[in-house]
Amino acid sequence: MRVFGRSLPMLVLLLATAATATAANPASGKGGWKAGLAKVVITPERPMWMAGYASRTSPSEGTLHDLWAKALVLQDDQGSRSLLISLDLCGIDREFSIGVREEIAHRHGLPLDRIVLACSHTHTSPVVGSNLITMYPMDDEQRHRVASYTEILARTLVELAGEAMRNLIDVHLSHGQGKAGFAVNRRENDQNRADELRAELALKGPVDHDVPVLCLKTSDGTVKGVVFGYACHCTTLALNHFSGDYAGFAMIELEKAYPDAVALFVAGCGADQNPLPRRTVELAEKYGHELADAVKRTVKGHLRPVLGCLRSGYEEVDLAFAPIPDRAHWEAEAASDQFAVANRAKSFLERLDRGESLPETYPYPVQVWRLGGLTWIFLGGEVVVDYSLRIKRNLGPDTFVSSYCNDVMAYIPSLRVLQEGGYEGATAMIYYGQPGPWAEDVEDRIIAGLNRVLRASAGQE
Ligand SMILES: [Zn+2]
């Protein structure tokens, strides 16, 4: 792994020289906001198994562009801090995430509700920890590489957080929403006919084309950081070369446009959305450009200041699985000729042999930051678009909804998608090694948990 090979002092640290840039920001309270940014390459140095597709039969063969971890610390005028780390990774598991967040919390005195690890869900990134582990036909050497990469990545992220904390400078904080149109509802449309359907005005199904933007500028107007999102799978590419897919290209373009800035991508509720058409590097670059362009237009013309202070909330909601089959079911599945089906069943049988039972619920993370009047919701798992549309329909435009945050344990269907079934509603649970599908109250439980966190973060509980 390149970054780890050349050790932590090689972290690419921005803003370190800009610490004297401004005095207080009168537009955002008594002392205004401070922000600290840092970034580090996390591209593996050795060939590794790549995450996200079951169809791969061999490890990575090179790098299209580097993968990054990027950290943003925000501090309000009361000295309250929060930390966002964006990751060019397909997903992370609960054990990895809790370990990293607890270590950061311990070292820097931040509570867990102030720390977010956000995955872009790029499918041209390495496998991390046990995320989607039943999907991959890895040999022992590849398993060892995943374990080794995961361990070093955890240490790197803790160090990265510390660097961002040390880089705090005064900033003007503002937000807005742009639009980009390349996400297509993949459940409702023939993915091979996306261009034709578009030309015929015949694309179907719900989409969320918002591009939320959080912008950090110094008092002279220099853009120092930009956080942006989009609700669409990072699956333009299926190469065996590492890349951040369209989100990676967008960040590259934005960091060229704003040479003093760090650009961080945070995925939205795009679990049932694909960038279509897809599968060429040119298309990944094109979508990256469309997204970067939406961000630049928003930064140029439609930003509102973030006034007020930082508040937060976090809860792990018990999400119930549908009734779990008995041992005979898993014994039958263990004989399946489908690799992932048999793999999941065998791991469950091993647990049952050890006298353990299979879990009936999962601790699902729901997190909220309030930055003045901006409400930013961070959901775990691969969340379908129904959630962001429902949330924004109710909370209005000063709301960002991010997904793939803190723990990517499964797809998170709405009741509609659960009842329809298919990949996002049911069968993806096999690859995530969950005894699912979720029970029919999945959406109710998440919305109820989110309501509790929203009330708590508003100081109403
Ligand atoms: Zn996915």
Image (cartoon, grey):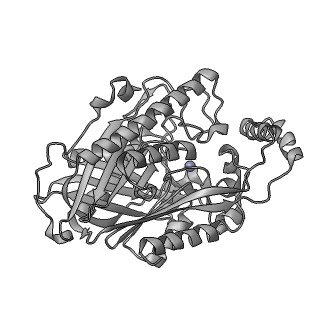
Q: Nearer the viewer, residue 174 or 106?
A: 106
- Please state the horizontal and vertical placement of residue 95, each as a whole percent of the image: 56, 43
Q: Is there any visible trace of residue 415 in the rendered image?
A: yes
- Please state the horizontal and vertical placement of residue 214, each as a whole percent of the image: 30, 61
Q: In the rendered view, does 262 fall on the left or right side of 231?
A: left
Q: In the rendered view, does 129 fall on the left or right side of 12?
A: right
Quadrant placement of the N terminus: top left
| 151 lies above or below 214 | above
Q: In the rendered view, does 279 fall on the left or right side of 337?
A: left
| 175 lies above or below 85 | below
- At 44% across and 28% down in the image, what residue appears? 44
Q: Is there any visible trace of residue 283 in the rendered image?
A: no
- Please state the horizontal and vertical placement of residue 439, each as a whole percent of the image: 72, 63
- At 24% across and 61% down in the image, what residue appears? 299
Q: Nearer the viewer, residue 132 or 461?
A: 461
- Please state the horizontal and vertical placement of residue 56, each as a whole percent of the image: 60, 32
Residue positioned most to the top: 141
Q: Nearer the viewer, residue 310 or 266?
A: 310
- At 39% across and 48% down in the image, what residue appears? 85
Name the quadrant containing residue 337: top right
| 206 lies above or below 5 | below
Tally the marks.
0
Name the quadrant containing residue 360: bottom right
- At 12% across and 60% down in the image, what residue appears? 219
Q: In the rendered view, does 432 fall on the left or right side of 77?
A: right
Residue positioned most to the right: 328
